[in-house]
Amino acid sequence: MLEKAVAFSHSLLKKSIIPGDIVIDGTVGNGNDTVLLASLVGKTGTVIGFDIQETAIEKTKQKLLLTGLLPQVELHHASHAQAVDFLPPNKELGGAIYNLGYLPGGDKEITTQKDSTLMSISFLLPRLRIGSLLVVVVYSGHPAGEAEKNALVDYVSQLDQKEYDVLLYQFLNQKNNPPFVLAIERKK
């Protein structure tokens, strides 16, 4: 059966992340992706998570405490554009995920922005381990969403096919700007 965008993004990550990996959650939000990543990397791995909203960091921390997964997670109240400041040098990433848009249940005026998202993704892509994925769930049904979507699709469409495979997973017959997935696999 066809999976919705978030479920599909999780399926992809489950196939590519291994215990001991260092992975990125570019938008921790309510913590669902962070919990998944922490379970995939196990006790020997590390999840480095970012969010510009303190509420998101606190909600995620509570979920991680309840699941016992907090020890393998570093949470940063910072933009994903600042990932360069937090990554260990000379370490490859086992994967990354972004859920763009606004915090579900939060202020819809606070959203991800195309410039910071593109900066973060362009920094992380060459850090991926060969065969690992950077996955973006794109929500374009908010004021900044259309510009962010267009900039992202334009950027990933121009990635060198010798270095990256790019997948667009989208439902075409749904109303109200359903989310879609961009998955980028590093080939070399």
Image (spheres, rainbow, N blue to C red):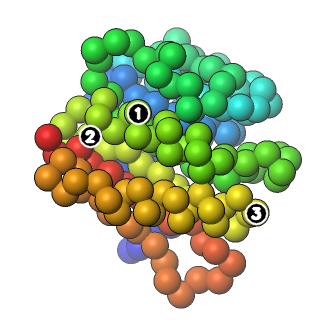
For residue 170, side relative to residue 52 (left or right): left
How far apart, in angstroms, are the residues tagged by discs 3 and 2? Answer: 32 Å
Question: Where, by quadrant of the figure, is residue 154 drawn?
Answer: bottom left
**Mark number for residue 123?**
1
> Could you tell me which residue is drawn at 56 percent across and 62 percent down?
149
Mark 3 vs mark 1, CA separation in Å: 25 Å
- The one nearer the camera, 118 or 133, is 118
Point out the tag, 2 or 1, that comes first from the N-terminus.
1
Where residue 141 sits in the image (x, y, percent)? 70, 68
Q: Amino acid at mark 2?
A: Ser
Residue visible at 39% across and 34% down in the picture: 124
Instruction: Name the mark on residue 143.
Output: 3
As drawn, 54 above or below 169? above
Pointer 3 or 1: first along the chain: 1
Q: Nearer the viewer, mark 3 or mark 2?
A: 3
The local crowd at label 2, few if under 14, some if 14 to 19, many if 20 or more residues have their Cα within 10 Å, is many
Measured as percent of width and height from the top left, residue 165 is found at 24, 56
For the question of whether residue 110 can be seen, the reply is yes
Observer-nearest of 52 and 59: 52
Look at the numbered discs 3 and 1 and tell me whether their residues touch, using CB distance below 8 Å.
no
Q: Label 3 amino acid?
A: Pro
Q: Quadrant of residue 8?
A: bottom left
Q: Is residue 111 above or below residue 81?
A: below
- Picture quarter with the N terminus: bottom left
Q: Is residue 162 above or below residue 68?
A: below
The CA distance from mark 2 to mark 1 is: 15 Å
